[in-house]
Image (tube, rainbow, N blue to C red):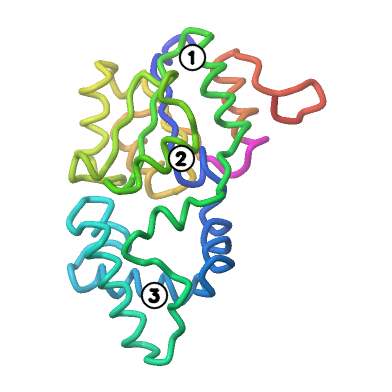
Amino acid sequence: MSDLKFIWFDFGGVLSPPIPALFEQYQFKTGLAPRVLQQAMSDVADELGVPMLAPVESALLSEQEWGARLEQALRRRDPQIDLSRARLQTFGEQWFAGVPANAPLVAAVRALKQAGFSVGILTNNVVEWSPHWRAMVGLEDVVDLIVDSSAERTRKPEATFFQVATERSGVAAEHSLLIDDVGENIEAAAALGWQVLHFRDNHQALSQLQRLTGVSLLQPAGEPA
């Protein structure tokens, strides 16, 4: 697409495995069921009057303080809960341990950059998690920009966060594309005039991205390159 200049990739659920899979892997590591952990995350956020992960994604709390509050929330709901395997105050290190990147999408970032597009990562993330997820995707030498909610103190789907991205890139909304797996984020970007691609799976996203950019991202058989 001739008017597309900057392609922004979400991290969680796009450059990483799907979010439900990450919760399942964390359950395998710690014994904490996804619904139990998510309820505790919601309890902590509700105390601050913000969405579930906003306390750490907007850097309202440090990872250590958030982890301590998670532990309190878990024990309030189940005083007998076994937290012996969970390292909640260094959550990110345990969460990302052994987790691979979504290799076909990481390869697409590299291919698009090589083809002349500007590429970036637009992520709701956590200050203390940065070393873990950046090492996981291995794109430091490729992307033009990383805009991280925890550094900006604003997060998707807030309009301010998208405005930060366009200001940093110097590329207007109509020439910017967001690839994200969360419908609320896609809707917010589209309302601000961004081009959007709602990620559902690798084949769907890469097929659409190939059509938009003219860059070959799929093998002839239809499998991700």
In the picture, residue 161 is in which quadrant? top left
- Looking at the image, residue 88 sits to the left or right of residue 203; the answer is left
Is residue 205 a member of the stretch shown in magenta?
A: no
- Please determine whether, in this image, residue 167 is positioned above or below residue 125: above
Give the secondary structure at mark 3.
helix
Q: Residue at x 35, y 29 (%)?
A: 194
Pinpoint residue 21: horizontal percent, then vertical percent: 58, 57
- Please determine whether, in this image, residue 69 is positioned above or below residue 131: below
Looking at the rendered image, the disc whose residue lies closer to the viewer, 2 or 1, is 1
Q: Residue at x 29, y 75 (%)?
A: 43
- Classify 10 Å Cα crowding around label 1: few (below 14), some (14-19), many (20 and above): some
Pinpoint residue 84: horizontal percent, then vertical percent: 45, 77
- Looking at the image, residue 167 sits to the left or right of residue 147; the answer is left
For mark 3, what is the residue? Answer: 39
Pinpoint residue 5: horizontal percent, then vertical percent: 40, 14
Give the secondary structure at mark 2.
strand
Front-most of 28 and 172?
Answer: 28
Q: Residue at x 42, y 32 (%)?
A: 178
Task: Determine contact: label 2, label 1, CB under 8 Å.
Answer: no
Circle number at residue 180: 2
Looking at the rendered image, the disc whose residue lies closer to the viewer, 2 or 3, is 3
Circle number at residue 113: 1
Front-most of 171 and 124?
Answer: 124
Q: CA distance from mark 2 to mark 1?
A: 18 Å
Name the residue type under label 3.
Answer: Gln
Name the residue type under label 1.
Answer: Lys
**Mark found first going from the N terminus, 2 or 3:** 3
Name the residue type under label 2.
Answer: Asp
- Looking at the image, residue 178 sits to the left or right of residue 60; the answer is right
In the picture, residue 107 is in which quadrant? top right
The magenta stretch is 199-204
Task: Determine contact: label 2, label 3, CB under 8 Å.
Answer: no
